[in-house]
Image (tube, grey):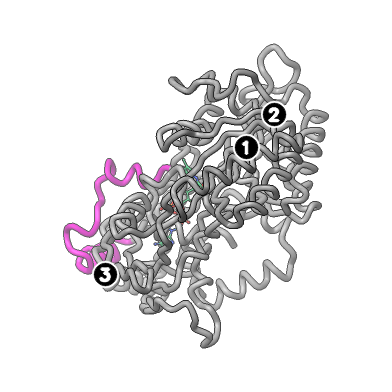
Amino acid sequence: MQANNEQPKARPNAVPAAVLERIKVAVGPKGYTMDPDEIAPHCQSWRDNWHGWVPMVVKPANVDEVAAVIAICAETGTPIVPQGGNTGLTGGSQPHDTGVEIIISTSRMNKVRAIDTINNTMTVEAGCILAELQQQASDADRLFPLSLAAEGSCQIGGNLSTNAGGTQVLRYGNARNMVLGLEVVLPDGRIWDGLRGLRKDNTGYDLKQLFIGAEGTLGMITAAVLKLFPKPTEIQTALVAVPDPTAALALLSRATEAVGEQVTAFELIQRRAIDFVLAHIPGVPDPMAAAHPWYVLMEISGQGAPDSLRNAVEAVLGAGFEGGEILDAVLAANRAQGEALWKIRESIPEAQNHEGQSVKHDVSVPLSRIAEFIERADQALAQAYPGVRCVAFGHIGDGNIHYNPAQPLDAEDGPKGADFAAEYGAINRIVHDLITEMNGSISAEHGLGRLRREEAKRYKSTVEMDLMQTVKDALDPSNIMNPGKVV
Ligand SMILES: Cc1cc2nc3c(=O)[nH]c(=O)nc-3n(C[C@H](O)[C@H](O)[C@H](O)COP(=O)(O)OP(=O)(O)OC[C@H]3O[C@@H](n4cnc5c(N)ncnc54)[C@H](O)[C@@H]3O)c2cc1C
């Protein structure tokens, strides 16, 4: 459950026909649609919890067409919602219900302009699907490491605009760490060509970082120079049962001491999440003979002599058993088994949807405080909502926990269904007050969009909010880029 906290508005002021006519001329017949059936999916979010309406979805073929459309919008004061794969989870890529906005979709801008295996870079257009970029990098014997469950649909422009995280942040960083250059159309229609593939460029402000994570509020990203990495020759995946999150973190330290940054992913999974997967996702078996309270999905990858990492992982697991951090472990024998272990982790969000209402949080704290956060949040929610079923899982190696309290079971005491949904704001408040008290973040990787915009005012300092607004006002004084999102 996510709250759409804005009331639908009437549509008295749809974009004037004369403006739409000018846009049609700028992009040609293939560059737009006004067909309500084609427009509808662009106006609805992935989780079907944000809806809006626009009279036109514009699909430019190249940066010049984007610039021409944005120049028309700037001149006529027409607000723009940039859209990539529309998999964002905070309502950022949805229009409002007023009809005064247009969507600019990057779906036709999907060319890989260049791959440079000496510079280890790939220059790509914003509409490239993430999974296709991973494949193209792989075909060139390189790795583009950004990876998330929506990778078959999300686009790199959206990934950069949300500064996406995913499963390999521990080793490679967030999306913003994988970018060397950007091409952006500014809110006045000018093109900033910052497509430099440089690892060193100390000539003033790092402008590209302004647009990464801006969720379309400062300009439209049209292309990027991405970093490529050596392809791992060995990938070892293990699912490890641990007594508690503290033991999971001890195991993380042990693993990084042994193999350094070759620890590529380290995901915490609470048993209740596995129970949900077993109950609702066909074909997923219980991974171990006995049930355990917590699990870690660990991936270690790199280059070197064949099986050198396997030996190292076995040594880490052996030492972890002896040290009491590990209760049981499954080390995948091959990639297929590794992928089956990942399927458990990646099925959790879908499985939880079958358990009635839940309130999703995407929070982070310093690693050293993760166990404390989960314990305190569990206690606070159990006190406020007897019978609530808290579920914690996620990228513990980055301090990022998806913390999703689910409604009590029917047999238990406490609000269920719509009554639980009505507690959305109150539950958010408990979790986010705690996370802020612990110097954490209320949005570790999904962004603010519309979902967390109002909350950000409560949890970010006045100085921080003022700085963000100053940047917004400087770049987009007419507030036409994705208005009502982020700031
Ligand atoms: C199943 C699933 C799993 C997910 N897992 C993760 C995860 O592990 N980690 C994570 O970080 N996120 C995750 N997400 C969220 C989402 O996939 C990411 O935020 C993704 O980066 C969004 O890309 P997109 O192309 O779909 O962007 P969209 O949803 O189209 O847009 C997202 C935001 O970026 C803006 N935008 C889009 N394109 C541009 C552009 N070219 N220029 C300027 N602004 C633009 C939009 O206006 C909007 O504000 C997941 C989502 C789903 C559905």
Which residue is found at the position 41% from the left and 61% from the top?
230
Question: Looking at mark 1, is its residue's CB closer than 8 Å to ligand 1?
Answer: no
- The tag on residue 296 is 1
Q: Quadrant of residue 225?
A: bottom left
Left or right of 300: which side holds 157? Answer: left
In the image, residue 111 above or below residue 151: below
- Nearer to us of marks 1 and 3 is 1
Of pointers 2 and 3, the one earlier in the residue sequence: 3
Left or right of 75: which side holds 139? Answer: left
The amino acid type of the residue labelled 3 equals Glu
Using the image as rendered, state which of residue 14 and residue 144 is in the foreground: 144
In the image, residue 272 above or below residue 487: above
Which residue is found at the position 37% from the left and 74% from the top?
119
Instruction: Tell which residue pokes out farthest to the left in this image.
Output: 29
Label 2: which residue? 327
Secondary element under disc 2, as helix, strand or loop, is loop
Q: Quadrant of residue 64?
A: bottom left
Question: Which SS type dominates the magenta stretch?
Answer: helix
Which residue is found at the position 41% from the left and 72% from the top?
182
The spot of residue 84 in percent (x, y) is: 38, 54
Question: Looking at mark 3, is its residue's CB closer than 8 Å to ligand 1?
Answer: no
The spot of residue 39 in percent (x, y) is: 31, 46
Q: Between marks 1 and 2, how big is the CA–CA gap? A: 11 Å
Question: Looking at mark 2, is its residue's CB closer than 8 Å to ligand 1?
Answer: no
**Mark 2 near mark 3, Cβ–Cβ under 8 Å?**
no
Magenta-highlighted residues: 16-44
The spot of residue 50 in percent (x, y) is: 48, 43
Of pointers 1 and 3, the one earlier in the residue sequence: 3
Of pointers 1 and 2, the one earlier in the residue sequence: 1
Using the image as rendered, state which of residue 383 and residue 206 is in the foreground: 206
Which residue is found at the position 70% from the left and 23% from the top?
415
